[in-house]
Image (cartoon, rainbow, N blue to C red):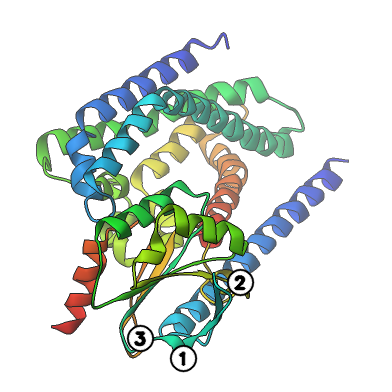
Amino acid sequence: MKNPLLWLLLLISLTLTVVTKNTLVSNSLYFNSLAEKLSYEQIQELLAKGKKWEWVGYILVLIVYIIKCLLVALCLTLGVFFVFNRFEFKRMFNIAVMAEFVFLIPTVFKLLWFLFIQTSYTLQDLQYFHPFSVLSIFDPLSLEPWLIYPLQVLNVFEAMYWVVLAYLLSKELPELDMNRSMTVVMSGYGTGLIIWVAFVMFLTLTYT
Amino acid sequence: MKKFLRTLAVVFILAILGYLSFGIYTKSRKKAEVSARISTLSPFSFNSIDGRKITNKHISGKPLWLVFFDTNCEYCRMETENILKAGEWKDIQIWLVSAEPLDSLSAFAAKYRLNSLPHVQVLNDTHHAAFLTFNVTSFPASFLYDSNGTLIKQYKGVVKVETVLKDYAGTML
């Protein structure tokens, strides 16, 4: 945990989560969005419970970021291992942390969008807002729930992330040019992502 | 050694992807089958808490709101409170169905005084229709059928009685 970039990533992501929660998600948004399901008192009860456990959500955000970086680093390590026959986990972890900053852009975009452009929204609007993704072409409510995640993953920022990973990999391992570096990213991270997306689809189909 | 590991990794990845793809295919097919099956009220058999056998024949020609629940689930208790708050309905009958033992269901019905509501019945899902017929994966899950046994709407989680009545009224227009 001596990686200052990791701390910076966690600090920014936590700040964005807190700011999003406190500026976009108000009590009245819950009341309006859940009015068809729960009574006023029941929503109040849920909000009180949510407030009590809010800190757990923030800790989970940090844990998810760390686990994601570890898994991406693992995928890249395996990719590099099959090309160079050597393990470079620590360097791959640094690359994963640096590249993760790309995914802060859509979070900031979402915050600004709902703060200044679409100021009237529901919880569902917040949940399904994925800028520059294939999902934004469709009406999410008309789709089968298990199709939402793969369509959400197909987005401009994911493509940027792949390029940034390949670029950082070629900088870290000068033996790799950009093309070979992209091959490592595709075979390592790409394979991991396909398995992850299939796993999420499988779980969604099982539990919805 | 490297070649062996590479082959092993490829086989491992293909095995995982094969398993997940097969799972996605079979589960999506099952989902489509369930959707088709529940679009009209399938034959069923439940037990009332006083031991009577309740089947399709006991539907009194009124729309039916079939609510699958569990007495230990907090949202199911919220749903029950919603039903109680709405008072007596003349137009729709409500069947609260759970696979739990009869004594738990009796205690639940007594606690919420459900026996005093003529349009509400608490029933025991003896044949696990929730899972086998309706593919319920979480409670509460409910299904609103019109008097001909055609599905009007299905709800996942809690829903207010006013919303159910609105959906029913929507089909009458």
Q: Position of residue B142 (x, y in %)?
A: 40, 67
> In this rendering, would A158 be left or right of A19?
right
Q: Is residue B151 above or below residue A94?
A: below
Tell me the tag on residue B159. Answer: none
Pointer 2 indicates a residue of which chain? B
Q: Position of residue A104 (x, y in %)?
A: 35, 30
Q: Is residue B48 above or below residue A13?
A: below
Q: Is residue B147 above or below residue A125?
A: below
Near mark 2 (Cα within 10 A), the count class, few <14, some 14-19 or many ≥20, is some
Please give the residue where the numbered disc 3 appears in the rendered image: B150
Distance between the alpha carbons at the discs numbered 3 and 1: 15 Å
**Badge 3 element:** loop
Q: Is residue A203 above or below residue B60?
A: above
> Residue at left 27%, top 29%?
A20
Pointer 3 indicates a residue of which chain? B
Disc 3 residue type (three-letter):
Thr
Near mark 1 (Cα within 10 A), the count class, few <14, some 14-19 or many ≥20, is few
Disc 2 residue type (three-letter):
His
Disc 1 residue type (three-letter):
Lys
> Residue at left 45%, top 46%?
B74
Closer to the eye: label 3 or 1: 1
Please give the residue where the numbered disc 1 appears in the rendered image: B57
Please give the residue where the numbered disc 2 appears in the rendered image: B128
